[in-house]
Amino acid sequence: LSYHVSPVVVSATASAMGLLTAVSNVARDAAEGEINYGTGALLFLMGLLGGLVGRKFGLYMTMRNKSSVIVFALCCALCLSAVYYVYKLAGTKFDSDLSDLCDS
């Protein structure tokens, strides 16, 4: 806002940059042969379905002037993702042995 840029433009720019980052990561992984296409297609379809449902839900709540429900749903999704990430991180064994790097 201090640069007098519309929030819609900022949001669209951030979304476009996120898309370009994701596409470049997929292209790099495809070039290195590290993609499981069956799992990738399943995750893509799940993301597409989730995006469509989320969009319809957002439009429905906006029409009903219930924007706070949208914010609450996004916060819940973010918190659940963070809790899952910490859970998975806590269950991962950290290898702190650096002797192999120094011996060569």
Image (spheres, rainbow, N blue to C red):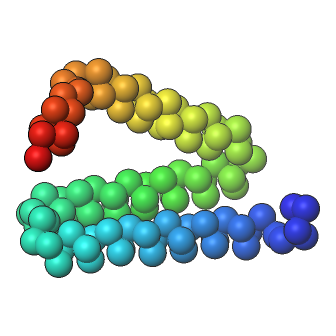
Q: Is residue 74 left or right of residue 21?
A: right
Number of marks in picture: 0
Horizontal and vertical percent position of residue 89? 30, 28
Q: Residue at x 35, y 32 (%)?
A: 85
Q: Quadrant of residue 92?
A: top left
Q: Is residue 28 left or right of residue 49?
A: left
Q: Residue at x 48, y 53 (%)?
A: 54
Residue 95 appears in the rendering: no
Q: Residue at x 18, y 28 (%)?
A: 97
59 over 67 or under it: above or below:
below
Horizontal and vertical percent position of residue 62? 69, 53
Horizontal and vertical percent position of residue 24? 35, 75
Q: Residue at x 26, y 63 (%)?
A: 44
Give the camera-side residue of 61 and 17.
17
Give the camera-side residue of 71 and 13.
13
Q: Quadrant of residue 67?
A: top right
Residue 47 appears in the rendering: yes
Horizontal and vertical percent position of residue 28? 25, 74
71 over 28 or under it: above or below:
above
Q: Quadrant of residue 5?
A: bottom right
Give the camera-side residue of 54 and 22.
22
4 over 102 or under it: above or below:
below
